[in-house]
Image (spheres, rainbow, N blue to C red):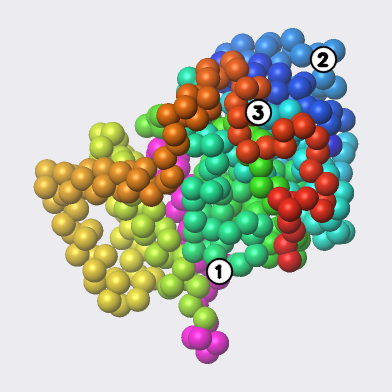
């Protein structure tokens, strides 16, 4: 296995990410860190792990995370690629679980992926299981379902066949958001199977979104939405309407929520991009939904009143998300919420294999599609 880590100004967290790689019960054959034009001392911190890991550091001008990952895969010497973002951390059994799963797969197995636990910037647990709190089934079986909602297959949680990755062209370098959904959807469409290991063996850090990140996300979202609309057009002669009934409603709801968040954060540029994206996508909806959407858009665009309505909608959405999830008991919440530096204890407190051994392919939590 080759671990590929894109690095851009990640000095604050890269050492913890690499320490998690060092702690793996199944050691990787190599670790390729692609410095994507960092201006901090992150690359110097990476070099501290020379001798502890079979490490290579590649340097390039800034070109984005997708391009950095593609370069890392091109330089890899292994048949399986494990992606890791610079501020995420693996629990010790992560690679072993995924490797055991793909070893029990077929020659059409394209990738395996685990569940994810979400922590905040300080390392406090926010969600013990990302996938159990989101819509969608795992492993991924339904193309329609993947068009209608986010896939929630995160790069840091995935082990990908290099052959499959190369066959579909890798990450779309135009995308700086939704590049993961785009990749895994193309793998599905190319006929590659996926395996889901139902254990949260990745700690994913959630940051407060910066204004620049929000703008990049809005632009990337629309690039991806247009790509899906072009790739999955409606086919009335077959009574199939993926653009009208799946793709456009999905991104309209997402853009409405992101518009509300941008208004709440006072990010005018991101709000304007979300509003423009909504106007563009409304034309793809059914006539009755288009009229309702246009009315919502007009009301939400009103000065003062519209912004207040959007902010209230965002608050209600956040409240609904919180109250729809099972609440942790106080004792369990305390046990699952140590500082980030105690990540080993977090891994032990989550629903993972307590023996730290790889899950065999016959394990009930390791399932493959189809």
Q: Which residue is mark 2?
A: 52
Element type at mark 2: loop
- Give the magenta-colored segment's residue range: 213-239
Q: Which residue is mark 3?
A: 348
Q: Quadrant of the N terminus?
A: top right
Q: Please check the rendered image and state whether residue 283 is part of the magenta-colored stretch, yes or no.
A: no
Q: Residue furthest bottom?
A: 237
Q: In the image, what residue occupies the spot 77% across and 31% down?
A: 356
The CA span between labels 2 and 1 is 45 Å
Give the distance between the C-alpha atoms of the residues marked 2 and 3, in whole angstroms. Answer: 24 Å
Can residue 230 be found in the magenta stretch? yes
* Badge 3 density bin: few <14, some 14–19, many ≥20, Cα 10 Å: some
User: Could you tell me if residue 335 is visible in this image?
Assistant: yes
Q: Return the x and y of residue 97 as percentages of the image width and height.
A: 77, 40
Residue 128 screen position, x and y as percent? 54, 37
Q: Which residue is mark 1?
A: 144
Quadrant assignment, res 49:
top right
Element carrying mark 1? helix
């Amino acid at each position: 296995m080759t671990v590929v880590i894109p690095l851009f100004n990640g000095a604050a967290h890269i050492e913890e990410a690499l320490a998690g790689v060092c702690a793996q019960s199944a050691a990787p054959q190599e670790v390729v860190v692609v410095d994507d034009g960092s201006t901090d001392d992150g690359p110097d911190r990476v070099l501290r792990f020379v001798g502890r890991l079979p490490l290579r550091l590649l340097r390039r001008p800034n070109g984005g995370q997708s391009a950095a990952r593609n370069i890392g895969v091109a330089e890899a010497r292994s048949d399986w690629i494990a992606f890791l973002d610079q501020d995420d951390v693996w629990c010790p059994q992560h690679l072993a679980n995924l490797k055991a799963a793909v070893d029990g797969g077929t020659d059409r197995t394209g990738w395996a992926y685990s569940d994810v636990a979400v922590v905040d910037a300080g390392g406090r647990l926010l969600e013990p299981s990302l996938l159990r709190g989101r819509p969608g089934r795992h492993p991924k079986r339904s193309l329609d379902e993947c068009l209608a909602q986010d896939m929630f297959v995160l790069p840091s949680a995935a082990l990908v066949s290099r052959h499959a990755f190369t066959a579909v062209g890798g990450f779309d370098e135009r995308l700086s958001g939704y590049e993961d959904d785009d990749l895994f959807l193309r793998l599905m469409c190319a006929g590659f199977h996926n395996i889901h290991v139902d254990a949260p063996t990745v700690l994913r850090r959630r940051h407060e979104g910066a204004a620049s990140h929000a703008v990049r996300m809005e632009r990337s979202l629309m690039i991806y939405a247009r790509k899906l609309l072009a790739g999955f057009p409606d086919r009335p002669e077959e009574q199939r309407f993926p653009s009208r009934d799946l793709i456009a409603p999905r991104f309209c709801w997402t853009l409405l929520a992101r518009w509300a968040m941008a208004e709440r954060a006072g990010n005018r540029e991101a709000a304007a991009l979300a509003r423009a994206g909504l106007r563009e996508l409304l034309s793809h909806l059914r006539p009755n939904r288009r009229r309702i959407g246009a009315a919502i858009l007009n009301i939400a665009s009103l000065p003062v009143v519209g912004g207040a309505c959007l902010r209230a909608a965002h608050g209600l959405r956040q409240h609904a998300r919180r109250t729809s999830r099972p609440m942790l008991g106080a004792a369990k919440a305390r046990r699952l919420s140590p500082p980030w530096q105690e990540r080993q204890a977090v891994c032990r407190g989550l629903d993972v294999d307590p023996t730290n051994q790889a899950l065999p392919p016959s394990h009930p939590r390791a399932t493959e599609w189809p």
